Image (tube, grey):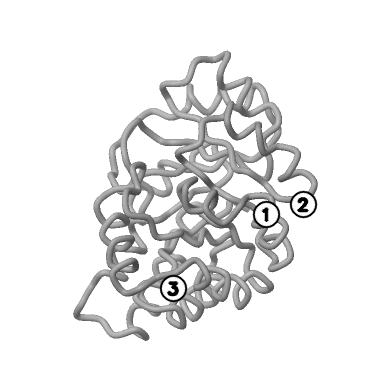
Amino acid sequence: MKKLVAYITSGYPEKSFSIDLALALGENGVDTLELGVPFSDPVADGPLIEKANHKALELGFKFKDLLEISQAVAPKVDTLWMGYFNSFYQQNMEKLIPLARQIGVNGLIIPDVPHEEALLYKDLFQANNMANISFVAPTDSEQRIEQVVSEAQKFIYMVAYTGITGSGKAEDLQPFLASIKKYTQTPVYVGFGVNAKTAKEKVAGADGVIVGSAFIDILLKDNLNYSQKIKECSSLAQIIKNEINP
């Protein structure tokens, strides 16, 4: 069965809501949850996620909120932290990674750290049985793809196109997928531009999809109350899971 990874912005609109939403998503088809760490300049994310990041920070998000959300969620849903390196570096990586593992977090997704720099923390992640998710993009050479994916853990984040998250841009991903799978048995998940309309097309030949902006779009709707937002997100998760597993 192909997997669904869902991204949500931690602490938006508030901590208890994030916990309730995360648990609901886990009950409605989401296999892995990305808890996003709000950051002032999320360079790899589109306008919706950027807006949610800024709103969470304006509402007073602190890193301890991420820890509390994770403590409630990670025992029940496969959980990753997605954030920019500065957010983690400020917490002291040598202390943070063991703490994350203790809470039950299974890995990190850090889009602004190149593969070569990520290798500096390879031993730390391995010692704590944590994954540091690898990214590959259409602009990568065959040689670089082989280098990045050869030791990839948990899954490979395949960027569906060059740009930012949240667009539904269509591309023929098959040659790119083939070049990745030539060098690894690690599952390949497609991210960027995945929603209910594009999921079936994007997942062809891949092992799963990563969906963020489509969920955040619901969270940003001011006309919905908390329970309605959770209901809509749960419904979207079910729809996408069914689309990728016809």
- Between disc 3 and disc 1, the foreground one is 1
Residue 77: image x %, image y %?
62, 68
Distance of mark 1 from mark 2, alpha carbons? 7 Å
Q: Secondary structure at mark 3?
A: helix
Q: Residue at x 23, y 73 (%)?
A: 221
Instruction: Give amino acid for label 2.
Output: Asn
Q: Nearer the viewer, mark 2 or mark 3?
A: 2
- Please give left or right for residue 9 compared with residue 127 in the image: left
Residue 186 occupies quadrant: top right
Residue 222 in the image, given as x and y percentages of width and height = 20, 77
Q: Residue at x 63, y 29 (%)?
A: 149
SS assignment at label 2:
loop
State whether residue 14 is above or below residue 237: below
Residue linked to disc 3: 234
Front position in the image: 89 or 142: 89
Comparing 112 with 169, the one in front is 112
Which label belongs to residue 14? none
Q: Are marks 1 and 2 in contact (CB under 8 Å)?
A: yes
Residue under numbered circle 1: 97
Q: Which residue is mark 2?
A: 128
Q: Amino acid at mark 1?
A: Ile
